[in-house]
Image (cartoon, helix red, strand yellow):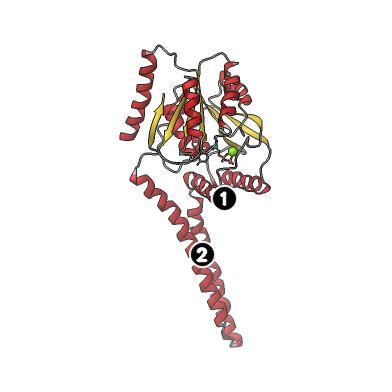
Amino acid sequence: SIHKHRIQLARGKRAEKEEQADIPVPTFSIIAPVYNEEETIPHFYERVVAVMEGLEKPFELLLINDGSSDNSYRVMCELHTRDPRVHVINFSRNFGHQIAISAGLDYASGEAVIILDSDLQDPPEVIPSLIERWKEGAEVVYAQRTRREGETKFKLLTARAFYRLIERITSISIPRDTGDFRLLDRRVVDALVTMREHHRFMRGLSAWVGFRQEAVPYVRHERFAGTTKYPLSKMIRFSLDAITSFSHVPLQLATSLGFMLAALSLIGILIAAILRIFTGAIVGQASTLTLVLFLGGIQLIFLGIIGEYLGRIYDEVRARPLYIVHDVLE
Ligand code: UDP
Ligand code: MG
């Protein structure tokens, strides 16, 4: 498609430039989405660089500015002028966390790509153990949370429920309690960038592509500064994207529920008829009304579910680009 072609051009151009300038292709690309993290970015940079320099292999740090409205972009520009290993992709507006990660994958040129949040909840110090597994042959190394610090009870509870639900209703196995913190081999990245769906659940996609997947346990820290950029409304949208991308169970639920209700109503009719014949009783208005409302409710719920899928199909059919880039600091 046109879009895919454009992406390849962008990466091709970049590789060309690197060849001309005699810059070796980095072994590692670090991708971090940034949305209003002005306080954290300098610390994030320091810690990532400290860890990566210890590995003594060329690396690049790709920061994606997802339409920040604070000083984040200025801070990133400063880092870029100070350190040529820092690249910045500046979005024209806020496109969302999952899209920002996808843009990072489009631009990354490393042999292994590491995705982590820029709020320091994913400690950069875990990266060497991800890389260790990669060297041993794993192609997707996801960091699995054994503990989460400084999160609300509500977040922990909903996250837990979400992963259990996903596990039950999807056919692919998305590992429990993993975020987007992971290492991807070049082969996996090349597969992922061909998938241009708009409602992206990256954890699902990177499980869907297959390859050799392994887990590394870690403790998820508290945010360094600022507050979460995932309010409840975004969390709901995120979950709906995940479910609709990987499962048709909600749609199929209508069929099974329909059969069940039809069977129930048959029994109801029989009971009403028997009562009428033997006792002369007439089943009253109230129960009729309740049943009509009940059925109406169920039908509306399933119309809504169909709508969720339909809206997403519409988004895909329009085939707009995933994101618009304002400028890139290469
Ligand atoms: N983020 C982003 N775009 C958004 C929301 C978040 O790029 O629209 C980034 C944010 O800067 C952070 C990461 O995605 O580095 C995860 O977001 P957040 O920490 O708010 O989510 P939480 O950890 O609370 O689930
Ligand atoms: Mg966070």
Please tell me which residue is depicted at 38% across the width and 34% down the height of the picture. 326
Is the CB of the residue bearing disc 1 within 8 angstroms of ligand 1? Answer: no
Label 1: element kind = helix
Please tell me which residue is depicted at 44% across the width and 51% down the height of the picture. 309
Q: Quadrant of the C terminus?
A: top left
Camera-near label (1 vs 2) is: 1
Q: Along the polypeptide, which appears first: circle 1 or circle 2?
A: 1
Q: Amino acid at mark 2?
A: Ile
**Residue 180 is drawn in which quadrant?**
top right
**Residue 119 is drawn in which quadrant?**
top right
- Give 279 or 258, whichever is nearer the viewer: 258
The residue that mark 2 highlights is 298
Mark 2 nearby-residue class (10 Å; few <14, some 14–19, many ≥20): some
The residue that mark 1 highlights is 232
Q: Quadrant of the N terminus?
A: top left
Please tell me which residue is depicted at 56% across the width and 38% down the height of the picture. 174
Q: Amino acid at mark 1?
A: Leu
